[in-house]
Image: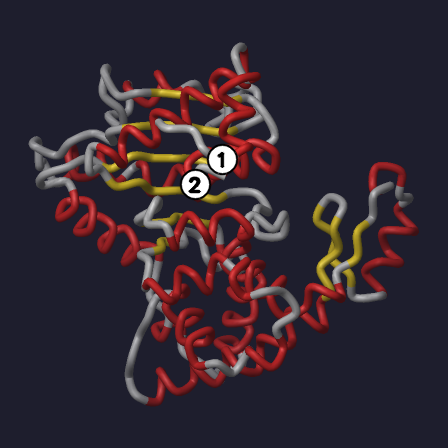
Amino acid sequence: MQSKGKITAFMLEHYKHFNSASLVDAAKGYQEQLDQGNKMMITLAGAMSTAELGKSLAEMIRADKVQIISCTGANLEEDLMNLVAHSHYKRVPNYRSLTAKEEWGLLEKGLNRVTDTCIPEEEAFRRLQEHIFKIWKTAEENNERYFPHEYMYKLLLSGVLEQYYEIDPKNSWMIAAAEKNLPIVVPGWEDSTMGNIFASYCIKSDLRPVTMKSGIEYMMWLADWYTANTKENGIGFFQIGGGIAGDFPICVVPMLYQDLERTGTPFWSYFCQISDSTTSYGSYSGAVPNEKITWGKLDINTPKYIIESDATIVAPLIFAFLLDW
């Protein structure tokens, strides 16, 4: 890769060993996948949207360096929350020393803490709720059904949130994704604030569960997408963190091969995981890539990388490398 950007040049000069070398190797491997015409999936676990990964991920999307995303419901919505309520967020750098009473005080102020950052409930959640409910309700009245991310795309593209924007919209990865209609899968969406809010409307009979497409339908859709997009080239897997955001989509390959008996299904063509999890007690997040061979997810010859570090540090650096910043 031709180096022009200062960050890229610094990494090539100084990141020579251990985790830093793995970082550069993984970034080069990612670029090689794209150069070969392969597509790339990025999976987002943790609170990467609250960590403002959108500052670099949005540009990755605009530059066509990611073709599909799998993320938790929290990452889906928290990018929007940051978009409309950024000035109301509160950073708590001394979060390690907070007492239980101080934590309760944050709750009473409507501040939900994610490590060192508090999300303002009223400004973030409630500012979105009114508008997303209208979109859900309109779909239901028209007997239409969509995936969670599709409703959020409708919300963003309608322009109704623009009155609330508190960051430069170019730093919102969800806006970038919506503008490209980027494929997204959101496993376990119910485990999110918006998922909880949707469930509450269903309990009150204001909405019906069927209005929201399910996780099973996400897997069915992903099976079709993977099959269609591996006819001539491969698809790589770039995993940030662990959990359901990674485990759900990577399983599409053994499902196609084993359960549907489509024995010609290719394995993922590249695998990289950024994780600081340790391998213990059957941990998925801490499992080394070779374990995935035994599950029919990766091939013997699949390029495999693991970077044992903090994703909030590593992911922006890899994206900067790929964007030649």
Query: What is the basis of the colouring in this image?
Result: secondary structure
Expressed as whole percent of the image width and height from the top left, the position of residue 317 reads 53, 34
Q: Position of residue 5 (x, y in %)?
A: 49, 35
Q: Is residue 219 left or right of residue 80?
A: left
Above or below, 74 against 296 in this view is below
Compared with residue 320, is residue 273 higher up or lower down, i.e. above or below? above
Nearest to the observer: residue 325 or residue 63: 325
Q: Up-down: is 188 above or below 145?
A: above
Residue underneath mark 2: 323
Residue pictured at 31% horizontal, 74% vertical = 145
Identify the residue at horizontal 40%, vertical 54% (top origin): 186
SS type, badge 2: loop
Left/right of residue 189 with respect to residue 169 in the rendered view: left
Say if 110 sits above or below 218 in the image.
below
Residue 259's spot in the image, x, y percent? 16, 38
Quadrant for the N terminus, please. Answer: top left
> Quick one: which residue is furthest to the top in this view?
17
* Residue under the image location 54 percent in, 66 percent down: 169
How far apart marks 2 and 1 lie (CA) works out to: 8 Å
The kind of residue on which mark 1 rests is Gly
Q: Amino acid at mark 2?
A: Leu
Dot 1 alpha-carbon crowd within 10 angstroms: few under 14, some 14 to 19, many 20 or more: some
Residue identified by numbered label 1:
5
Dots 2 and 1: beta carbons under 8 Å? yes
Which quadrant of the structure image shows residue 46? top right
